[in-house]
Image (cartoon, helix red, strand yellow):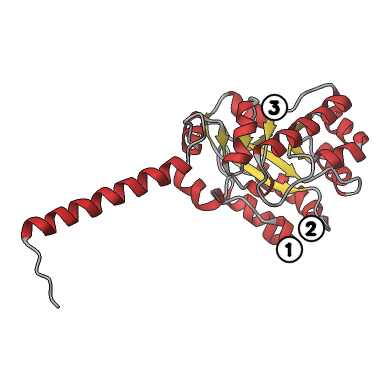
Amino acid sequence: MVIYLGKSTINYLICGLLLMALLVGAVSYSTLTASKGVSVEQWLRDGQVIKQVSTSKKVVALTFDDGPSELYTSRILDVLKQNETRATFFVVGKRAEKYPAVIKRMVTDGHEVANHTYTHPLSPVKSAKLTRELDKTDDIVYGIIGRHTQYYRPPGGKCTHSMIDPAVDKGYKVILWTNREDPKDLSDPGVPQIVSQVVDYVRNGSIIILHDCGGDRSQTVEALPQIIQGVQEKGYVFVTVSELLRDSNTVPAIEEFRMENWVE
């Protein structure tokens, strides 16, 4: 049986479909919005979630994740000291608890200590659990060095509301990293690749990510002096995350962020 529809009926159907599409879009957008009505994109615009900064100064931040490691972090601290270079360490609470002397040395040598959760969960956790992870790590760090953590990096850079909301509510700045300069040293691509990825793509306001724990970090340790030399030869100065943000404007990079990190 063939049903013939009048022009007005077809127009009504088209309008109905468009309305449904708008409603679906509104629901999808609402999933990007926290209970307070603040979207992750808005946090990017407001500088609560940061992956790059805009500055006319040739300054970059060197950051390390997943430590401390008694072996590799100590060797990295040796290299940094020899090269008079400061960095920011995003530490895992349970490892800081195990190696407090390494945390103390970070501060003694002029570095910055930041929060990378207590257990480093590889999958997003519920907000209540993240709150406990942040608090426990902060308590441990404060007990060791007498300072609270101001910056937080979600494990793997995975950003869901449950991994960002509690941190922002507590006043943390969520620090990611600039993508082009990421050498993915955890995958052990080889020392030359680690060095060239950072040195070739470094730019004003880069946030460079390396790892001082999470398997054999020998390549990272070996690459570090060459990275420092190569970046400095291009006229850049290494600063802590705090110093990088002090005189800079954050860059939203919303679309790039959503493609790389958005998992919810």
> Going 68% across and 51% down the picture, which residue do you hit?
123
Residue furthest front as drawn: 1
Q: Position of residue 244 (x, y in %)?
A: 62, 30
The answer to whether residue 109 is left or right of residue 169 is: right
Residue hosting label 1:
190
Q: Is residue 94 above or below residue 188?
A: above
> Going 77% across and 53% down the picture, which residue do you hit?
220
The answer to whether residue 135 is left or right of residue 205 is: right
The answer to whether residue 101 is left or right of residue 8 is: right
Say which element carries label 1.
Answer: loop
Locate the N terminus by quadrant: bottom left
**Mark 3 and mark 2: Cα distance apart in space:** 29 Å
| Along the line of sight, the residue nearer the viewer: 55 or 234 | 55
- Of the two numbered discs 1 and 3 on the same chain, state the one appearing first in sequence: 3
> Which amino acid does the dot numbered 2 rest on?
Gln
Q: Position of residue 5 (x, y in %)?
A: 10, 65
Q: Residue 138 is drawn in which quadrant? A: top right
**Mark 1 and mark 3: Cα distance apart in space:** 33 Å
Asked if residue 86 shows in the view, the reply is: no
Q: Is residue 24 above or below residue 60?
A: below
Residue furthest bottom as drawn: 1
> Which amino acid does the dot numbered 3 rest on?
Gln
Say which element carries label 2.
Answer: helix
Residue hosting label 2:
219
In the picture, the disc for residue 150 is 3
